[in-house]
Image (cartoon, rainbow, N blue to C red):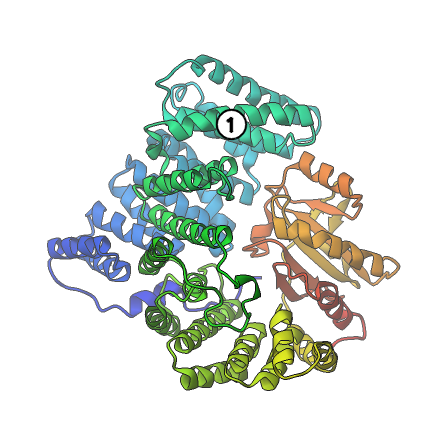
Amino acid sequence: MKNPVLPTLTALTLASACADIRPHSDLMVDAAADVDAIRFERAMHRFDSARTAMPEDAEAHSRYAEMATYFQLYAKAAEVWERVLELEPANAAAWDGYFHALRWAGIFETDRRYGEKLMQLLPDALRNASRRPGLYDNAQDAAADVGQLEAYHAVLNDRRESEADNPVFLQHLGEAQLALAELQEGDRSQVLKDSMRAELDALAERNRDNAEIAAPILYRLAAGYDYLWLGAQADVQLAKELTANKDIWLSRLLAAPDRGVLADDLRYWDLVLKFQIPRGGPGAAEDMDQAMRIVEEGMESSTLSHRGAWVNRRESLVRAMADQAMADEPAPGDESRSMAAEPRRPGLAPEYAEPLFEAVMDEIAWQNVAPTSSLSRLLHYGIEPQRVLEEAINLEEALRADRPGYLYAGSRGEARESSRQSVIASARVLQARALAQLGETEAAGELFEELATESPGSQTLAQFGRHLVRTGQPERGLDMLVEALAHGGGWRRTAEEAAAAAGLPVEVVDERLAVRQPVVQAELEARALGARLELDPPDLALPDQNDVEWALRDLTGKVVVLKFWATWCGPCLAEFPHFVKLLEKYEDDDEVVFLTVATAGSPREGLKEYLAENGYTFPVLLDNEGKAVDFEILGYPTTFFLDPDGLIQYRREGFEENGYEHQTAIRIDALRTGGGM
């Protein structure tokens, strides 16, 4: 099922850079200065030239691999980390970086060989880097991806005695035990969970009165009880006990003076927020301050990509602080402010506006995400529209040049190009909105109209409609907003405002929508069906939750809807009520089969509980072998539609509630025997 070979982002990026033939020492100095100045692309090219000039310099290779990892060029990074370890076999940071690159190369290249190689190297890695938290995270996730969780646990268990004083190792051994327990059923699962609970209770008892306990041990206790709690929510009393224990140790962790040593473990942030999410009301300011201190500690991480992630967390936190300020102190008349207004909200007080602007500019400088939502937030509050305009233009230029750091690197082929064009359109919408705020009404209108014509969709149509309402053309704006609604957008309030401004009753919105929606729906259906994939599927033969074996090769002659999902995936669970409606619709149809595959990381006991609680009886295949990798799945849910000849013809990623049943049905009906295009 591999796609045709396409030029990789690595090739596109490196081919655009001219080789720098200056002395090795000069290149290293200048590249380091580029990193300090957050000029990462230039630094990457200079480190590349430096390692070419001196192939035996492990540092040059390491620095280049760090930059390649930062820009999600994982296959290249893995290759270079391997060279570093040839030169320095005991380099703990290199082992950590290598495992990170291997794990994500396996995901982005959808190639299980990367994960299998990681598992082969795990004993060597542990001998040299057993105190690196990230190494375990990547190893356990890779083991789940390729169906080798039991082998992962066995490797860790072999080192239990030699790592008895290593809290990082012990924490991850406990997590491995729990992950394995979740894939077991009945008594075996409970024995493993009880064993982990006993170890945590013993560790807690030894350290309960220890005022000098180190942050990694506190983290192990808080995280361990949290992991157990996730699997114990059906037992109310047990869940309460585990929550109380977690909160005790997390409170102490938050007060630990050495908690900054956890900056390289990004799950630390997630754990903290479970305990202390800023929600407004009494104590909100203190919660925000505490969260910001944790972010600033995270910025001291030794890993560039981790610091980039903390930059994004800081922007999210500052944004939350700004939004909370507006929620706590609404401006007079804010409740009735027009949806068509630009900016959409009144201005922020300087103590919130300035940090928000600075955080967004930092996020842009770090170049590890397309900052459309962050720039949009600045326009939402009318902050620095001139700067937003400039950055949105820069973003469009970067996307057109296909520079690294702006798109999800796992997307390829048509999906990647579609994503690139979508973000370009979003960047241009930002430009038009910024022009409107700067008073350049005519230029904004021209750009909005161009976007609505060239890239018609709910956002571009609605933004043009908003602009028309603002500039005294409410009836034309109403038509654009109705088009946006027909495309699935949530712009009803603005459409009703447009109708009122045009002197029309609000009922006209539904009247016009009734005319346009069938036409737009037909266009979207034709686009959704489009060209078929005509792909042979990988072999798939797995047992379901009732130990009934299912194999795709046995379903020839039927249309097969094959959904990959995970118990921890929110959109997957949100999709199921709609999925069940489809099952009911087709339950008497012998030409259609629905199968779901629970990914290798889905807890078996939790899965059975979830199915029982919701009364779901449809087949759920248990992917203990990591088949999702063979199907090139990069996110959940992912659904495949196979024709009666057994070929994959359509692929759908993610879950969109609006029109879900209809969009699924048209694909099924298109693939029936004798039906189709």
Q: Position of residue 666 (x, y in %)?
A: 74, 70
* 418 lies above or below 84: below
| Residue closer to the observer: 432 or 9 | 432
Identity of the residue drawn at 30% across and 51% down: 65
Identity of the residue drawn at 50% across and 44% down: 280
Kindly state the secondary structure of the residue where label 1 is placed: helix
Identity of the residue drawn at 42% across and 86% down: 442
Q: Position of residue 427 (x, y in %)?
A: 43, 71
Tag 1 residue: 247
| Residue closer to the observer: 604 or 276 | 276
Instruction: Judge whether residue 531 can be spotted in this image.
Output: no
For residue 129, side relative to residue 34 (left or right): right
Query: Badge 1: few (under 14), some or many (20 or more) residues near its Cα, within 10 Å?
Result: some
**In which quadrant of the rendered image does the N terminus lie?**
bottom right
* 651 lies above or below 285: below
Q: Please, which residue is most extreme toward the right here?
A: 588
Q: Position of residue 350 (x, y in %)?
A: 34, 57
